[in-house]
């Protein structure tokens, strides 16, 4: 679960990050959730990021079925357009 964070922190020179993650993932990480926080602090340096832990990872796409994921982390990382 810790290495999953490494897989999504790949954007060079991030400006802002928004993440959603399963509350079950947070519970399974326990005290190690602070290691996730530290990885993100090191990655974003002085830039802002927000992680929201929520229940219910339901996804619906037009022309597709509604389905649930479990213990995931999803990211939207933005960078400044120079």
Image (cartoon, grey):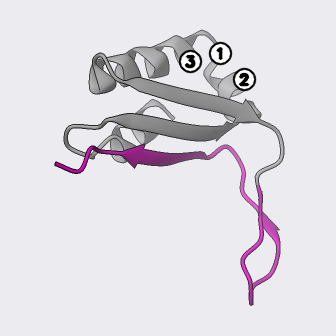
Q: Residue furthest front?
A: 82
- The residue that label 1 is drawn on is 30
Using the numbered discs, state the Cα–Cα distance from disc 3 to disc 2 in whole angstroms. Answer: 8 Å
* Position of residue 38 in the picture relative to residue 65 (left or right): left
Residue occupying the point 77% across, 71% down: 60
Q: Residue 66 lies in magenta, yes or no?
A: yes
Is 25 placed left or right of 34 in the picture? right
**Which residue position holds label 2?**
27
Label 2: element kind:
helix
Q: Quadrant of residue 24?
A: top right
Q: Are marks 2 and 1 in contact (CB under 8 Å)?
A: yes
Closest to the observer: 80 or 37? 80
Q: From which residue to which does the magenta span run?
A: 58-82
Q: Per the image, is 7 magenta?
A: no
Residue 50 image offset from top left, x and y in percent: 55, 28
The residue positioned farthest toward the left in the image shown: 82
Q: Main secondary structure of the magenta part?
A: loop
Residue 62: image location, x then y, percent: 74, 83
The crowd level at tag 2 (other Cα within 10 Å; few <14, some 14-19, many 20+) is few
Task: Categorize mark 3 by other alpha carbons within 10 Å: few (<14), some (14-19), many (20+).
Answer: some
Q: Where is 59 relative to 31, above or below?
A: below
Labelled pair 1, 3 in contact (Cβ < 8 Å): yes
Q: Which residue is mark 3?
A: 33
Q: Residue visible at 61% across and 22% down?
A: 29
Query: In front here: 53 or 3?
Result: 53
Position of residue 48 measured from the top left corner of the image (x, y, whole percent): 42, 24
State the image quarter where residue 31 is shown.
top right
Q: Residue furthest bottom?
A: 63
Q: Assign a secondary structure to mark 3.
A: helix
Residue drawn 82% across the image and 39% down it? 55
């Amino acid at each position: 679960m810790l290495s999953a964070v490494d897989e999504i922190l790949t954007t060079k020179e991030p400006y802002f990050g928004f993440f959603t993650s399963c509350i079950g993932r947070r519970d399974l990480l326990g005290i190690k959730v602070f290691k996730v926080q530290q990885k993100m602090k090191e990655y974003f340096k002085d830039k802002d990021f927000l992680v929201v832990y929520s229940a219910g990872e339901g996804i619906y796409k037009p022309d597709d079925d509604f389905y649930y994921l479990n213990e995931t982390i999803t990211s939207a990382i933005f960078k400044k357009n120079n």
